[in-house]
Image: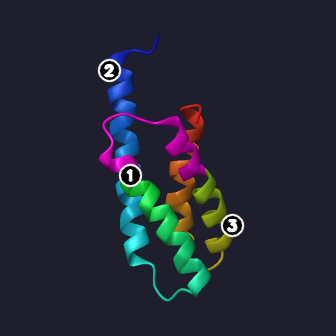
Amino acid sequence: MDDPITQAHDQRYMHALLQALHTELERSGSLSEDERALLIHVKADVDGFLERESPEAEHDESLGAWLQEGIAAFEASHPELTGAMQRVLDSLSQAGI
């Protein structure tokens, strides 16, 4: 069983990463219609994660899928955004999601 202190720390860390990603999503400059649609999905999943008290595997897996797609789409054009996405994806992966 996981230590409650570790779980609380992990959750705070994930929230911090998601807040940073949220900021980068808000800063995204000119985007194509497809890129904007992708970011809308990522942002909705990030917002949903931040609003929940506890993780929900189904929603977190959806966020992971959107992040993977976003990383591939924005790697060259938005390196800060993809870096933030990668950090969140890595954290989800470490949590077993």
| Residue drawn at (38%, 52%) of the image | 48
Q: Secondary structure at mark 1?
A: helix
Comparing labels 2 and 1, the label whose residue is closer to the camera? 1
Which of the 4 image quarters holds residue 9?
A: top left
Magenta part mainly helix, strand or loop? helix
Identify residue type, mark 1: Gly
| Residue drawn at (47%, 10%) of the image | 1
| Separation (CA) of disc 3 from disc 1 | 22 Å
The residue closer to the viewer here, 61 or 81, is 61
Identify residue type, mark 3: Ala
Give the residue at the far front of this rendering.
Answer: 58
Which residue has dot 3 on it?
A: 72
Residue 60 image offset from top left, x and y in percent: 51, 43
Magenta region: which residues? 48-64
Which residue has dot 1 on it?
A: 48
For residue 82, side relative to residue 1 (left or right): right
Q: Which mark is residue 5?
A: 2
| Marked residue nearer the N-terminal end (3 or 1) | 1
Q: Quadrant of the C terminus?
A: top right
Q: Secondary structure at mark 3?
A: helix
Q: Which mark is residue 62?
A: none
Comparing labels 3 and 1, the label whose residue is closer to the camera? 1
Bin the neighbour count of mark 2 within 10 Å (Cα to Cα): few under 14, some 14-19, many 20 and up. Answer: few
| Residue drawn at (64%, 71%) of the image | 75
Identify residue type, mark 2: Ile
Bin the neighbour count of mark 3 within 10 Å (Cα to Cα): few under 14, some 14-19, many 20 and up. Answer: few
